[in-house]
Image: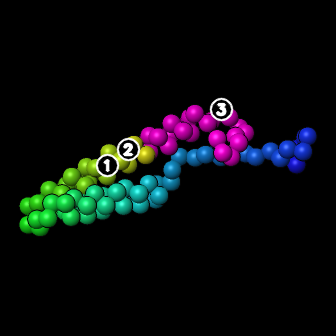
Amino acid sequence: MGQGGHSSCKIKIEIMEPKKLIVQVVAAILLYVTISMILEQDFNSEIIKREIVEGIVFGIIYGLFVWLSSRWRKKKNSGNDEQHPLN
């Protein structure tokens, strides 16, 4: 315990691990394609190819967003050595 009966709590925030980011992007692509195909209700090869391409584009945009927001949070918190766990 620190001074005055308060324990110090340090939180280390790092940029998202590449494996975790890749898993999230692949999951986003699969969800996008699955939901799009259910809503489309037509399963010919041209529509399947189009939905897969759109899903890949969506996954790339989503991955960039997650990666940039992770970097932004790291920069925002880099000046704060001690953070409250709920902040």
How much space separates mark 1 and mark 2, taking CA atoms? 6 Å
Instruction: Tell me the kind of residue under disc 3.
Output: Gly
Task: From the viewer's perspective, tell me whether residue 61 is left or right of residue 80.
Answer: left
Instruction: Tell me the kind of residue under disc 1.
Output: Ile
Task: From the viewer's perspective, tell me whether residue 15 is left or right of residue 34.
Answer: right
Element type at mark 3: loop
Q: Determine which residue is flagged by label 1.
A: 60
Could you say where residue 15 lies in the image, as x and y percent from the top left?
A: 53, 46
- Quarter of the image holding residue 22? bottom left
- Residue 52 seen from this side: no
The local crowd at label 3, few if under 14, some if 14 to 19, many if 20 or more residues have their Cα within 10 Å, is few
- N-terminal-most mark, 2 or 3: 2
Could you say where residue 35 lies in the image, as x and y percent from the top left?
A: 25, 61
- Quarter of the image holding residue 67? top left
Instruction: Tell me the kind of residue under disc 2.
Output: Leu
Element type at mark 2: helix
- N-terminal-most mark, 1 or 3: 1
The local crowd at label 1, few if under 14, some if 14 to 19, many if 20 or more residues have their Cα within 10 Å, is some
Q: Determine which residue is flagged by label 3.
A: 79
Q: Residue at x 21, y 64 (%)?
A: 38
The stretch in magenta equals: 67-87
Q: Determine which residue is flagged by label 2.
A: 64
Do residues under tags 1 and 3 come within 8 Å of each other at their CB atoms? no
